[in-house]
Amino acid sequence: MVAENYYFKPIVRVLQQYIHAGLIGQPLFIELNRINRGRISGWRADAELMGGGALLEGGVHWVNFMCRLGGEVNSVLAVAPQKDYPKVAPKEDSLELMIKYADGTVGKLLHSWNISNRIGGLSMSKIYGTEGNIHFESNGIFALVLGRKKRLRVVNPLDLMGFRSMLQHFISSVRENRPPEMALEIARRDMEIVDAAYRSLETGHFEPTKGFLTKFNMAVKY
């Protein structure tokens, strides 16, 4: 069992239902934005204790989110601002990923610990399809479909982060002696994508996600 609460976020299941129902036709682009500026403390502020930068220490949850929406990832391109600016963490604090999914869909993930967000930490994201779009709040508060049909869904605020659903699933998996959905293989897949992103920062090219996992000893310099 791997404790990845983003796998169980209610908004993920809502978005999957809308996509699978064909309400926006075929998905073409998935755009996920997660920005905020805050004080980074504890082990995340210690270069010796950090395994990597913001993408590894927080963004990996959003990578899981992207995979839940778009499926298998073939390759990733990562870019960071090439400017001298005050960082909030010892290593990289902001990255944008371009993602090529196996089915041809294109994804974009903007993840930052250091972009000002003056609307209470809320961020807007979108899924663009051939026959409509889905607009949703990145944390999972609501989803609005403007496509073949119109839908507005406000998600249960009592389990916005998915912790309750995750724990219930884990307990039932143990009681019923069945494998949990969020297995080690999925966590490894997410880490392979993060690893590919860090390799892409070095090469400047799209990097494949399969069969690598080279850096998690973890000597990331960014």
Image (spheres, helix red, strand yellow):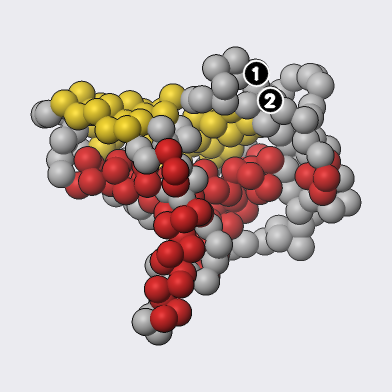
Task: Name the outermost residue toward the left.
Answer: 148
Query: What percent of the width, then of the height, locates residue 127?
Result: 32, 32
Task: Name the outermost residue toward the bottom.
Answer: 177
Query: What percent of the width, then of the height, locates residue 49?
Result: 84, 53
Q: Residue drawn 83% across and 45% down? A: 42
Task: Name the outermost residue toward the front.
Answer: 158
Q: Is residue 137 visible?
A: yes
Q: Image quarter for residue 105?
A: top left
Task: Quarter of the image for the C terminus: give it.
Answer: top right
Dot 2: element: loop
Dot 1: element: loop
Q: Residue 11 shows which numbered tag?
A: none
Q: Image quarter for residue 174?
A: bottom left
Q: Amino acid at mark 2?
A: Arg
Q: Residue drawn 50% across and 54% down? A: 163
Q: Residue drawn 30% across and 41% down? A: 15
Q: Is residue 74 visible?
A: no
Q: Earlier in the sequence, mark 2 or mark 1?
A: 2
Q: Amino acid at mark 1?
A: Ser
Determine which residue is flagged by label 2: 37
- Count of numbered badges drawn on the protein: 2
Label 2 crowding class (10 Å Cα cut-off): few <14, some 14-19, many 20+? Answer: some
Q: CA distance from mark 2 to mark 1?
A: 5 Å
Q: Nearer the viewer, residue 183 or 82?
A: 183
- Pointer 2 with pointer 1, Cβ within 8 A: yes
Determine which residue is flagged by label 1: 116
